[in-house]
Image (tube, rainbow, N blue to C red):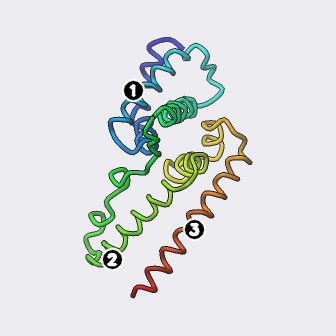
Amino acid sequence: MDAQEFTDIVEKHSGFVYNVAYRMMGNPHDAEEVVQDAFISAFKARERFRGDAQPTTWLYRITVNAALMRIRKDKRGKEMTVSEDARPDIASNNWAESPVAATMNSELASHIDAAINDLSEDLRVAVILRDVQGLSNQEAADTLDVSISALKARLHRGRIALRDSLEQYMAERSNSR
């Protein structure tokens, strides 16, 4: 791949790469650093890109690896987060929704974010790539460099943990009424 082809890929997919980095890092500053690290790594490895995979799969894998390396290097032990800023504002999307319903939906969304953040790193990344980012099983497995069955196992465990957390949250809410 020559420099112009690489530039075209960066221009076409930089928003997607930033979104993955932001979802994994939880703040714009760290996400921008991960994007920079990812594109530097991709540029250095551009000659090895054979075109067997989609450019997005290749960039996702590089971005996820850059984010994981940054997280592991962080001496403060910062966890990957799904930031409230990264999800749509539920209340503003439905003007017909009552304030009580909007508040309840916002609380639920915050609880879902917290539950995703509580997942172990391997489950969290699988859930973010597959269920939040919307990658196919194949794309997510390729990004994580695991088999589809390993991805499905991580998703299954992650979704069960999320379901259990949501069931507990809903039970607490119904008991408080």
| Pointer 1 local density, CA inside 10 Å: few below 14, some 14–19, many at least 20 | few
The residues tagged by marks 3 and 1 sit, at their Cα atoms, a distance apart of 38 Å
Query: What is the C-alpha distance between the residues marked 2 and 1?
Result: 40 Å
- Secondary structure beneath dot 2 equals helix
The answer to which quarter of the image holds residue 103 is bottom left
Label 1 secondary element: helix
Residue 56 position in % (x across, y down)? 53, 33
Q: Amino acid at mark 2?
A: Ala
Mark nearest the camera among 3 and 1 is: 3
- Who is closer to the viewer here, 44 or 122? 122
Residue picked out by circle 2: 101
How many C-alpha atoms fall within 10 Å of the one at disc 3: few (<14), some, or many (≥20)?
some
The location of residue 99, given as percent across then percent down, is 26, 76
Question: Residue at label 3?
Answer: 163
Left or right: where does residue 86 sit relative to residue 42?
left
Question: In which quadrant of the rendered image does the C terminus lie?
Answer: bottom left
CB under 8 Å between callouts 2 and 3?
no
Tell me what residue is drawn at x 72 percent, y 46 percent: 150
Q: Is residue 78 above or below residue 61?
A: below
152 or 24, which is in the foreground? 24
Tell me which corner region of the image, top left, top right, bottom left or bottom right, holds residue 155.
Answer: bottom right
Say which label, 3 or 1, has the lower sequence index: 1
> On screen, 117 above or below 29?
below
Apparent side of residue 42 relative to residue 145 in the rendered image (left or right): left
Give the residue drawn at x 56%, y 52%: 127
**Residue 79 x %, y %:** 46, 46
